[in-house]
Each structure stands twice: as structure tokens, then as C-alpha cells.
Image (cartoon, rainbow, N blue to C red):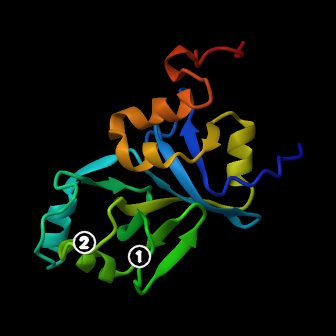
């Protein structure tokens, strides 16, 4: 079977209701990069019990100025490298390790952005995640053929401002799809 050649970079992937992998049930994943060698993304609606403020304290960066989102939770960005942190944010900066993404989004993985957040000079809109989601060559394409995912355009309102528990359904509704009405048994004999 020939796999689709679509590129899902800078798209949301929504786990379909029949998703079998418990790490991705009802998740919305922002795909940062996708090419013939695979794909990399961050799950953006799976909060951990750790707040950003607690994380800053744990890495010896005590908060010196009030955080814009004091109750913001660190996200479980995916099952790969869960000890590695990432900050997905709006607004650029002069941080040591920042990747420029489309639509004025940035991904920073250096400690200096955490320092900036603790000092009150970080970006206004940001998500902090531990770990990421990764797919090998052709893996994401195969999962798309198997209807494991639904893709839709990135919406920064959903990404940064909507409560975590509403993101999956809101992204689907942006396509006119109500995930609550999808029957996972349809089409199976």
C-alpha cells in the first residue's frame, strides 16, 4: 500500500476516539517537524501534577517576579526523553537553543528561558513540557492511514489559552467534528 505523502508539520494531531495507546488517548499533539525521516511533536493537553513554579524551584530557579500563569502545569509532552524540557512559546527571544517555527511560534530547550520566566522577563504565552512524541520514517503516515489521528490547523488560542481538558474537542470542532459523536466501532465487521 502506498502511504500518503502529506506533511503534518505545524499541524495539530488529534487522537481519534479509538486510539489504543494509553499515552495518547484524547490527546492533541502539536507537530513541530515532519519529513521523510519521521516526525516530532509535543502533546499539549496532558498536564502533570507539577506546576511551572514548582519546576522552577526544583531546578534552582526561584521565582523572583509573579508568573503570568501561576497555576500553569508542566505538560507530559510525550513518551520520549521525559527528562528533557521544552518551552513552546509565542514571541522570540535571545535564548541559547531556540528553534523558529511557523506563525511566530518558537521552541526553546535551554535553561536560560526558564531563568527568564523566573525573573518575569520570559514570553507571555508559553507551555512547558517534559518529553516529546516521536515517529520513525513512515510511522506517522501509517498511523494516519489506520485512522489513529485527525489533523487540523494549529490554533494558538487553543494552544495557549483554552483549558487543557477542552483542547481536544475544541480542535476537532474547528473542523466541524464532534469527537463525542464518533463511534469507534463504525466500519468494523
Residue 47, image x and y in percent? 30, 48
Residue 138, image x and y in percent? 75, 56
Residue 135, image x and y in percent? 62, 58
Kindly identify which residue carries mark 1.
109
Numbered tag placed on residue 81 in the rendering: none
Q: Residue at x 31, y 81 (%)?
A: 111
- At label 1, counting other C-alpha atoms closer than 10 Å, the crowd grade (few under 14, some 14-19, many 20 or more) is some
Label 1 vs label 2: CA separation?
13 Å
Residue closest to the far right: 2
Rendered-image quadrant of the C terminus? top right
Q: Residue at x 36, y 60 (%)?
A: 126
Q: Residue at x 70, y 16 (%)?
A: 188
Q: Nearer the viewer, mark 1 or mark 2?
A: 2
In this rendering, the count of numbered labels is: 2
Q: Residue at x 52, y 45 (%)?
A: 155
**Mark found first going from the N terminus, 1 or 2:** 1
Rendered-image quadrant of the N terminus? top right
Q: Is residue 6 left or right of residue 96?
A: right
Q: Is residue 8 left or right of residue 55?
A: right
Asked whether 124 or 9 is in front, the reply is 124
User: Disc 1, disc 2: CB below 8 Å?
Assistant: no
Badge 2 element: helix
Vertical arrangement, residue 112 with respect to residue 126, above or below: below
Kindly identify which residue carries mark 2.
117
Vertical arrangement, residue 74 with respect to residue 108, above or below: above
Q: State which quadrant residue 59 falls in.
A: bottom left
Q: State which quadrant residue 103 falls in.
A: bottom right
Residue 70, image x and y in percent? 16, 55
Residue 39 in view of the camera: no
Residue 90 in view of the camera: yes
Amino acid at each position: 500500500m502506498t502511504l500518503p505523502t502529506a506533511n503534518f508539520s505545524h499541524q495539530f494531531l488529534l487522537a481519534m476516539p479509538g486510539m489504543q495507546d494509553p499515552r495518547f488517548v484524547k490527546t492533541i499533539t502539536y507537530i513541530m517537524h515532519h519529513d521523510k525521516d519521521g516526525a516530532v511533536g509535543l502533546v499539549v493537553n496532558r498536564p502533570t501534577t507539577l506546576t511551572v513554579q514548582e519546576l522552577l524551584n526544583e531546578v534552582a530557579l526561584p521565582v523572583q517576579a509573579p508568573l503570568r500563569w501561576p497555576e500553569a502545569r508542566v505538560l507530559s509532552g510525550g513518551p520520549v526523553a521525559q527528562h528533557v524540557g521544552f518551552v513552546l512559546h509565542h514571541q522570540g527571544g535571545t535564548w541559547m537553543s531556540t528553534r523558529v517555527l511557523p506563525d511566530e511560534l518558537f521552541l526553546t530547550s535551554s535553561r536560560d528561558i526558564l531563568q527568564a520566566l523566573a525573573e518575569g522577563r520570559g514570553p507571555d504565552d508559553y507551555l512547558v513540557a517534559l518529553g516529546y512524541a516521536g515517529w520513525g520514517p513512515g510511522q506517522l503516515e501509517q498511523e494516519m492511514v489506520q485512522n489513529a489521528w485527525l489533523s487540523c490547523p494549529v490554533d494558538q488560542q487553543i494552544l495557549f489559552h483554552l483549558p487543557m481538558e477542552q483542547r481536544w474537542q475544541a480542535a476537532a470542532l474547528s473542523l466541524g467534528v464532534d469527537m463525542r459523536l464518533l463511534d469507534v466501532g463504525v466500519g468494523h465487521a
